[in-house]
Image: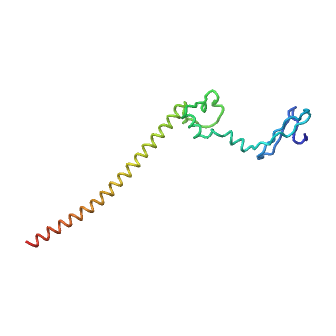
Amino acid sequence: MADDVCLKKDGQLIFPSPAGEKIRIKYIWNEDRTDLVEHERIDVVKEMNERAKGMSIPEQIARLDRGDTSVLDSNRVTPEDYNCDVSGMPEHPIEVIDQVVQAKASIQVLKAKEEQDKKLKALQEDLIVKKAAYDEAMKAIDAVKAEKKDGE
C-alpha cells in the first residue's frame, strides 16, 4: 500500500481523508498479509442517513408512544452528555406520552369546534334567508291591510 494513504503516528495506522469527502474507503489485508488493499468504498452520506433513521424528535416521540422507553434511558444519558437548558423537558417517558395524548385530544377538540362553527355559520345563513322571506311576507300582509283600509 502507498505510504501517503497510511501514515504511522505513535505506532497507530492512520487513514486520513479530506474533509467533505462523500466516499470512505475500507481497507483489508491482502492474502499474504503484507499490505493493505482496498476492500470497498462506503458512501458516507448514505451511511449517516441510515444511522439517523428513528432519531428525529417526531420519530422518537412515536417510539415512546408505542412504549419504547429506550429513547430516554437515564442510565445511558447523563447531564454531562449534553449542555443545554432542559428545564422544561419531561423527566419521565410517560410525561412525553401524556403530552402526545393531550395534544391529540386538543386537536380533536379544535376539529369539533371548527365543525360546530361551520354548522353555526350555516344556521346563520339559513336564518338570514328566512328573515328575508319573513320580511317579504310581512310587506305583503301590510300591503293587503292597506288595500282593505283604502277599500272601506
Given residues 65 and 5, the one toward you in this image is 65
Q: Residue furthest top?
A: 75
Position of the N terminus by quadrant = top right
The image quarter in which residue 56 lies: top right
At horizontal 81% and vertical 39% (from top left) the residue drawn is 26
The answer to whether residue 66 is left or right of residue 1 is left
Given residues 29 and 18, the one toward you in this image is 29
The answer to whether residue 85 is left or right of residue 13 is left
Q: Residue furthest front?
A: 31
At horizontal 22% and vertical 64% (from top left) the residue drawn is 137
The answer to whether residue 139 is left or right of residue 54 is left
Q: Is residue 111 above or below residue 32?
A: below
Q: Residue furthest left?
A: 152
Residue 124 position, x and y percent, is 32, 55
Residue 45 position, x and y percent, is 72, 44
Structure colour scheme: rainbow
Residue 127 position, x and y percent, is 29, 57
The answer to whether residue 37 is left or right of residue 80 is right
At horizontal 64% and vertical 29% (from top left) the residue drawn is 76
The image quarter in which residue 73 lies: top right
Given residues 48 and 99, the one toward you in this image is 48
Q: Is residue 72 above or below residue 110?
A: above
Count of marks placed on residues? 0
Position of the C terminus by quadrant = bottom left
At horizontal 14% and vertical 67% (from top left) the residue drawn is 145
Residue 135 position, x and y percent, is 24, 63
